[in-house]
Image (tube, helix red, strand yellow):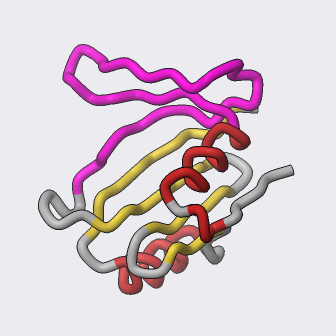
């Protein structure tokens, strides 16, 4: 099953975690303090990442698709980046950026 993926740039991780946890009615699956948070629900994969500029802007969209053989991305007609990846590929990317996360998925 595919999960819709939304990646948003935020200026304040803690306040954003509180807000999106309320909106999604669940806590993040992963938190990298002051840097990143990830929610994985049955239908949605939402990530937030601290940015210095363009806070509140969609960084990219895409699909978490466990049948994806590799990570891919392209741009749509409007210039929006769309990614396609498996949960394991996303975990590998997170662990490359933040090795201390030691994030794993089943």
Report x, y in % for residue 95: 60, 55
Q: Residue at x 24, y 14 (%)?
A: 77
Q: Is residue 29 left or right of residue 31?
A: right
Report x, y in % for residue 37: 51, 68
Report x, y in % for residue 39: 60, 62
Quadrant in the picture for residue 78 = top left
Quadrant in the picture for residue 70 = top right
In which quadrant of the rendered image does the N terminus lie?
Answer: top right
- Farthest residue toward the top? 77
Above-or-below relation of 65 to 7: above
| Relative depth, front residue between 95 and 82 | 95
In the image, residue 81 lies in the stretch drawn in magenta: yes
Q: Which residues are magenta?
A: 57-86
Q: Residue at x 63, y 68 (%)?
A: 101
Q: Residue at x 41, y 50 (%)?
A: 7
| Relative depth, front residue between 99 and 105 | 99
| Relative depth, front residue between 64 and 72 | 72
The secondary structure making up most of the magenta span is strand
């Amino acid at each position: 099953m595919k999960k819709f993926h939304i990646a948003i740039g935020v200026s304040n991780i803690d306040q954003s975690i509180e807000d999106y946890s309320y909106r999604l009615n669940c806590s993040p699956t992963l938190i990298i303090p002051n840097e990143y948070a990830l929610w994985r629900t049955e239908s949605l994969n939402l990530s937030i990442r601290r940015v210095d500029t363009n806070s509140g802007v969609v960084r990219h969209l895409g699909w978490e698709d466990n049948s994806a053989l590799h990570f891919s991305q392209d741009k749509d007609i409007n210039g929006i980046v769309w990614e396609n990846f498996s949960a394991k590929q996303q975990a590998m990317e997170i662990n490359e950026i933040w090795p201390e996360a030691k994030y794993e998925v089943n």
